[in-house]
Image (cartoon, rainbow, N blue to C red):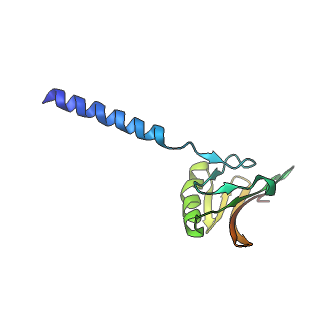
């Protein structure tokens, strides 16, 4: 019985390690490398705007939503961004240090996009 418990314990550790190895590494926006890209979003790098000013950075990153809903995206970022130090101050609005991050959506020619905008909070 004792050997069976040890074997079971080792099997659980092995299986949990194998499952972790199958999880994809998180991807981040190219210009906002502290903001993850939700699985299912496709960054449109040609639409990225990025400026560094003495007051702070200004970044706008855009991603095609494919089959991702606005609700799922807001839920994902509402759960994920606090892990990166962002405090949610409203739906799709976050604050960290001297920066403000806002998420908004747009539709162009039948395609839905998510925009991540980071500005100095001065």
Q: Residue at x 35, y 37 (%)?
A: 15
Q: Is residue 22 above or below residue 49?
A: above
For the residue pair 112 and 48, the one nearer the viewer reads as: 112
Which image quadrant for residue 6? top left
Query: Toward the viewer: 90 or 44?
Result: 44
Quadrant in the rendering for residue 91: bottom right
| Number of numbered discs visible in the structure rendering | 0
Residue with the most extreme front position: 109
Residue extending furthest toward the top: 3
Looking at this view, name the residue that lies furthest to the left. 1
Who's the residue at 63% across and 52% down the image?
A: 37
Residue 88 shown left or right of residue 111 in the figure: left
Quarter of the image where the C terminus is located = bottom right
Along the horizontal axis of the image, is 21 left or right of 31? left
Q: Quadrant of the N terminus?
A: top left
Where's residue 120, x and y in %? 78, 57
Residue 77 image position (x, y, % from top left): 59, 59
Q: Where residue 29 sits: x, y (%)?
A: 69, 50
Is residue 4 depicted above or below 56 in this figure?
A: above
Above or below: residue 54 compared with residue 101? above
In depth, the one of 92 and 54 nearer the eye is: 92
Identified at 38% across, 39% down, the residue is 16
């Amino acid at each position: 019985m004792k050997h069976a418990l040890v074997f079971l314990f080792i099997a659980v550790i092995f299986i949990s390690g194998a499952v972790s190895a199958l999880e994809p590494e998180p991807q981040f926006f190219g210009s906002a490398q502290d903001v993850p890209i939700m699985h299912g979003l496709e960054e449109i790098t040609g639409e990225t705007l990025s400026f560094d000013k003495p007051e702070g950075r200004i970044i706008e990153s855009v991603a095609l939503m494919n089959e991702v809903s606005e609700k799922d995206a807001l839920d994902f970022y509402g759960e994920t961004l606090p892990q990166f130090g962002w405090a949610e101050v409203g739906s799709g609005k976050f604050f960290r240090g001297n920066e403000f991050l806002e998420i908004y959506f747009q539709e162009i020619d039948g395609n839905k996009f998510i925009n991540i905008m980071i500005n100095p909070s001065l």
